Amino acid sequence: MIRYLLGRLASLIISLIVASLVIFFVIEIIPGDPAAYMLGVGAQPDTLAALRAELGLDVSKPERYLRWVSGMLQGDFGISYTYRSPVSEMILERMWVSLPLALYALILSTLIAFPAGIYAASRRGKTGDFAVMGLSQLGVAIPNFWFAMLLVLAFAINLRLFASGGFPGWDKGFWVGMHALTLPAISLALPQAAILARIMRSALIDMLGEDFVRTARAKGLSRAQALRRHALRNALIPVLTIIGLQFSFLLAGAIVIEKVFYLPGLGRLIFQSISSRDLIVVESTVMLLVFVVIMVNFAVDIAYAAIDPRLRRRR
């Protein structure tokens, strides 16, 4: 188990180094000078040079990369070019919206997908299976931003049960904040639940055809008992992979939903920073999201080993 963990940890570190190089140099080769963008057309050369020195843009790109990485290792993400405030504070403020939203949506999608997938697998070829698969196909086909607008129309405008957008802040109370995130979480969760339910059903059906399940059936277990006691645990490995990928998507890819509901999350921060050429904010925010994605994948790998000891021995 220790060798397995060390191997996963080494892969994590290499992935972070490669990701930081790619993020920095891809963003840095974008045409345009942030200092010139901030000062506008007709800026004097000496004023432009002074601003570039103030922003740390007057040194070579490798030196800027080393400064950026060493600062992040110490918890210093730099100073925003546009807002002149620490990037870490800006990210932390937005993270308290994006992270609860992603977790909320992931919990909803899991609570919907697991029973639906198990139900469909246990009734393969029957009416219940066709109904679940039909609904899941519809969930996959509908874009989440269009579904979000339908939710706003139904529950915010017509029924007036939820606000159409905005976030009041956690200082107003936990349930007030969760109420504001409910519609965005549902619009993110349902398409992901449809995908996860199909994966769960497929994995369970594959497991039900394995020899160990047939042996359990031959010993007198019913199909439902064999599914619950033997097939379900082994079917969780591909499902955990999808859950890890979904959390990464929900955290980093919710920019459209945040725009629909006017949520002050990381997605809107990245969008605004790109528009204003605030490169340090874009680099640091994207790197943080990549770090979260890699850590989630690392946790999924550890969960693999906990569920299936054969992976540890094979490693």
Image: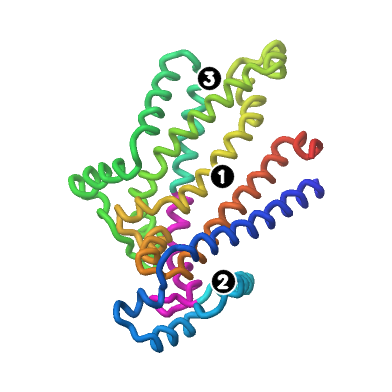
What label does residue 122 carry, if any?
3
Give residue 240's quadrant in the image: top right
Would residue 224 be counted in the magenta stretch?
A: no
Q: CA distance from mark 3 to mark 2?
A: 58 Å
Residue position for label 2: 61
Choose the circle earlier in sequence order: 3 or 2. Answer: 2
Expressed as whole percent of the image width and height from the top left, the position of residue 199 reads 53, 30
Residue 29 in the image, given as x and y percentages of width and height: 48, 63
Within 10 angstroms of label 1, few (less than 14), some, or many (20 or more) residues? Answer: many
Residue 181 or residue 295, whichever sits in front: 295
Q: Which residue is mark 1?
A: 244
Calculate the distance from the C-alpha at mark 1 to the C-alpha at mark 2.
34 Å
Q: Foreground: 95 or 175?
A: 95
Q: CA distance from mark 3 to mark 1?
A: 25 Å
Q: Earlier in the sequence, mark 1 or mark 2?
A: 2
Specify whether 2 is left or right of 154: right
Highlighted magenta segment, given as a residue range: 79-104
Question: Can you say whether 40 is above or below 273 in the image?
Answer: below
Q: Is residue 226 left or right of residue 28?
A: right
Task: Give SS at disc 3.
Answer: helix
Q: Amino acid at mark 3?
A: Ser
Amino acid on which disc 1 is placed = Gly
Quarter of the picture containing the C terminus is top right
